[in-house]
Image (cartoon, rainbow, N blue to C red):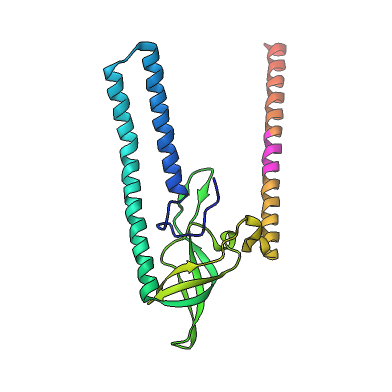
């Protein structure tokens, strides 16, 4: 899966939407193949056709509802962005930090997070620097997705939307990769993770050897004393 782009969760299809779509396609194709194989072996059966059609409806209706709701959210976001660009104040701002939002996708093996960027800019109307946190989450960390933390925002009250930014074409050009301190930290984390995995692997081997040795000992004792 391609890494997430720097856009709002309601702005376009994201990781979670693509995953749901892929699952729907997989289930639909699997059901159709199962029906074809069954009919090829046993001949056409009306009851089987009804069952497969019912299953397809059960699979597809929730997905269609999800994408209908998604389309509405995307249209509403487009309208919101147009409103901010028409009625809001335009500033050049720096993303200085971010907060984790609700994950787009979460499982035991993988999690895709969302982020609320925190921006700072100088507002000449009040002659001071202003710091705001985004009410709406984005699909990627600015450190992973952008070349620069300088963005264009439109502000209404205490709310803002990011409209222009400098995306990193590849991960090597992202802010995170070009920050030496973060690179060292990530390398250290990777080394620690590798060491932990090595410890688990060695521990598993030792456990297997001890279990095998115990089995041999019990077998030898059983032959000798029983």
Above or below residue 216? Residue 158 is: below
Please state, as top left, top right, bottom left or bottom right, where the N terminus lies in the image.
Answer: top right
In the rendered image, residue 163, in percent from the top left (x then y), is placed at 46, 67
Who is closer to the viewer here, 217 or 68?
A: 68
Among the 4 quarters of the image, the one containing residue 19: top left
Which of 10 and 36 lies nearest the eye of the viewer? Answer: 36
Residue 3: give x, y in percent of width and height: 55, 51
- Identify whether 126 is placed above or below 108: below
Residue at 55% across, 48% down:
2
Closer-to-camera residue (80/198): 80
The residues colored magenta run: 197-204
Instruction: Look at the image and tell me in which quarter the C terminus lies.
Output: top right
Q: Is residue 136 left or right of residue 95?
A: left
Residue 17 lies in the magenta-colored region? no
Q: Residue at x 42, y 55 (%)?
A: 12
What secondary structure do most residues of the magenta stretch adopt? helix
Residue 140 location (% of width, % of height): 52, 58
Q: Residue at x 35, y 70 (%)?
A: 83
- Residue at the image position 42 percent from the left and 35 percent from the top: 25
Total numbered circles: 0
82 or 199: nearer the eye? Answer: 82
Q: Quadrant of residue 75?
A: bottom left
């Amino acid at each position: 899966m391609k890494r997430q782009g720097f856009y709002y969760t309601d702005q376009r299809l994201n990781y979670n939407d693509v995953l749901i779509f892929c699952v729907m396609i997989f289930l639909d194709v699997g059901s159709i193949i199962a029906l074809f194989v069954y009919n090829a072996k046993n001949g056409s059966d009306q009851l089987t056709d009804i069952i497969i059609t019912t299953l397809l409806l059960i699979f597809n209706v929730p997905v269609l509802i999800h994408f209908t709701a998604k389309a509405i959210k995307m249209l509403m976001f487009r309208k919101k962005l147009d409103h901010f660009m028409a009625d809001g104040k335009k500033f050049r701002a720096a993303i200085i930090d971010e907060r984790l939002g609700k994950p787009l996708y979460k499982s035991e093996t993988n999690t895709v997070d969302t982020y609320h960027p925190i921006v700072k800019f100088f507002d000449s109307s009040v002659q001071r620097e202003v710091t705001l946190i985004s009410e709406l989450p984005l699909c990627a960390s600015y450190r992973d997705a952008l070349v620069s933390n300088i963005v264009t925002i439109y502000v209404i009250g205490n709310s803002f939307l990011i409209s222009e930014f400098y995306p990193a074409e590849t991960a090597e050009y992202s802010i995170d990769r070009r920050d030496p301190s973060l690179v060292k930290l990530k390398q250290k984390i990777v080394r620690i993770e590798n060491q932990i995995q090595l410890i688990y692997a060695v521990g598993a081997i030792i456990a297997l050897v001890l279990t095998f040795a115990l089995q041999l000992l019990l077998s030898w004792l059983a032959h000798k004393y029983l």
